[in-house]
Amino acid sequence: MEYSKDFEVYSKPLLKAKVLKQVLVKHAAMKTAEDKFKYTQSLFMKYKMVRDVKYIKRAFQCCISLKDTKIRICGNEQFREKKYELAINTYTVCLMKGTPGTLNYALTFANRSAALFELSMYSSCMTDVQRAIDTKMYPSELLYKLYMRAGNANRLMGHSNLAKMNYEECLKHLVYAAMSKRQKTAFKTDVLNFIDMCNNMGNLNYLRINDQLPELLGGPNEQIPAFSKFLELRCTTNMGRGVYTTRDLNPGDTVAIDSVYICRPSLDSLNLCCYSRCLEVNWAVIPCPNCRLLVYCNEECMQKSYVEDAHNLECPTLIYAPTLPGKTMINLLVINWFFKAISQMGLDKYCSIVHDFSKTKLDLLTRGFNGNGQYISDEFLTNYSLYNDENNISSEVSFFFSCIATNILHCIIKRGMTIPKHQIVTVGASFLHMVKLLSSNAIKFRTSWGRWEEVFARGLYPSICLFNHSCDANVTSYVLDKKTVVLKTLQPISKGSQLCISYGLNFQNNNKQWRDLHFKNVLKFKCLCQPCIENWPTIRYTPNRLSTHYLLNPNMAYIVSLECKKFLEFQNTVAKETNFHEEEHLTYLINFAKFLFINVKRPFKLYEDCIDMLFVAQKTMLGVHKESPDVKSIINYFVRLDYL
Ligand SMILES: C[S@@+](CC[C@H](N)C(=O)[O-])C[C@H]1O[C@@H](n2cnc3c(N)ncnc32)[C@H](O)[C@@H]1O
């Protein structure tokens, strides 16, 4: 089983009592979530299955058991070894462990600013310099260094006036520096040279490209405002609901823009602001001083998250989150979802809504729509009614999910929340529903740093969840910022066809055998897309040369071969240019894709190549690479979104 290691926590006492088998059978036979929860709760009491260990250390933080000053020293060593990313994270851990307003806190901000500077993250560096100064604890004999760093950061960002002010402050504080007269004179000369440089360079302002959201094709859909007006939901017996188009679509059309409902980071990720309306990647974060687990860009994001994300309510429970069995991000999402919901509607209303939901049999095409017939991404019931693949999970996983739900509820109560007796089962059953729903619907954000990849957050986007998967996706997602995902068509799509995204697998790179295995083990459904049904070869085995075999219309042979030759030239020349993502190239790629779409049979190598190029070109046009105001960030941060 996928969760076997974690499952042991709960299965061990049952195995010891020789009852596991019958428990699984009995649990599987129960029809409702409420019955499953009640039964699991009774087992928890009888066999003492609760897991409520406060976290001792987080996976990433080998040094968390050290005192905060020692952690900073550890960061300094990593800095000296030029492991700047690691050093930044170690300093962040030090802030989590430390006490605001102390000397060590001030020094940590200052040291982190130095590492940020080395990675050319100048605006984050400036933020930390300012924080170090604001503590008023930073040693006065070292202040000149901070101002020098601030001057350099501002100068390199093109803010010459600000840089000059920093350099002047630096000179003022140089008198307190513990260095010889000669050293001071040499240092002063350097600073004056920098001031001269600032005088000659003027004041640059970096442009942030494409900050605006693209517009939905034809405007928003009346029923599902996150969709273009040309999309509709339809239901089929083998795929359930799916998204279809009511007119022909071109590659590049914006068909959906969805906002995150809830999102939670991996606890090993120390660079993502946890405020759900921000979710920016930020290397100069501050931790929540209470749970010391979630981090934020600044005080403002933290305060907003306390109120809007109900972090003030969930915070005490989070102390158990890292040691709870199961997938930590899913557990965090359940906790966050519950507290967000009760902060908006109160516990009584919450219980009445989830109870009614469990008793009502909903039509597939109307579930999730509110009383006005609309499907709204940030409404509770829209999300709570998402597809739940409970029929596809094994009896072990199903019981394991019940255990997680029971354990989360136990932790919440243990940390001080009062839930009246008559509501306990309703709340517990709702947790079970959420665990299942989130396990199959919460989208993963991955980053790649060179070859290394990590899932750094998971979030729920209810409108994107309506799209089915294809190993030949004709729609792709672009994560503008983590709170907004834009879906654009990647291929021509004929009127009446289904729009599909990729859940992380494609026929080009993954052969059918490999895909089948992943569908069975991870995604838990049998894929019914065209490449799977027709067993398309991977791109490696798709010949490059045009033959009559590929032509849909033999009369077009000459023109098709001419256009293919032109495309090969385009590939060769444009790939060598650095500015190939310009609008005219995008238009050329769109037209070539449309031309091949009606004239050749797939899979066809040049068509697939063209779609690959379109993906990159669209991404650049959307400015997805901009990521942070640190223009020259050397870390090529990249976000990919999938379910796998
Ligand atoms: C996120 S939901 C997609 C929307 C869902 N069809 C609904 O009715 O709400 C994912 C589920 O849709 C179904 N599905 C998606 N893509 C499929 C495919 N290519 N073949 C078969 N079933 C698919 C599977 O049951 C899968 O677990």
Image (spheres, rainbow, N blue to C red):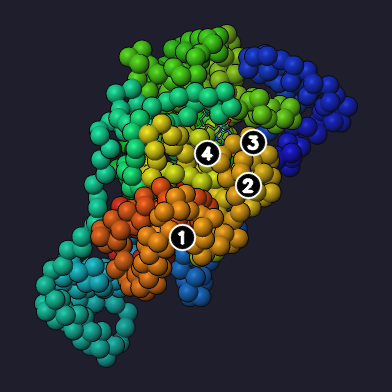
Q: Disc 3 marks which residue?
A: 526
Q: Is mark 4 within 8 Å of ligand 1?
A: yes
Q: Which residue is mark 4?
A: 469
Q: Residue at x 68, y 30 (%)?
A: 393
Three-letter code for the amino acid on which mark 3 is drawn = Lys
Q: If you read the primary sequence from the N terminus, does the residue marked by circle 3 or circle 4 appear first?
A: 4
C-alpha gap between disc 1 and disc 4: 23 Å
Q: CA distance from mark 2 to mark 1?
A: 19 Å
Mark 2: few/some/many CA within 10 Å (<14, 14-19, 20+): few
Left or right: where 548 falls relative to 283: right
Distance of label 4 from label 2 (alpha carbons): 16 Å
Q: Earlier in the sequence, mark 1 or mark 4?
A: 4
The amino acid type of the residue labelled 2 equals Asn
Circle 1 crowding by C-alpha within 10 Å: few under 14, some 14–19, many from 20: many
Tell me the residue that label 1 is attached to: 606
Counting from the top left corner in percent of width and height, residue 51 is at 68, 33
Give the secondary structure at mark 4: strand
Residue at image coords 22%, 72%: 155
Question: What residue did someone put label 2 on?
Answer: 535
Q: Where residue 59 sits in the image (x, y, percent)?
A: 60, 52
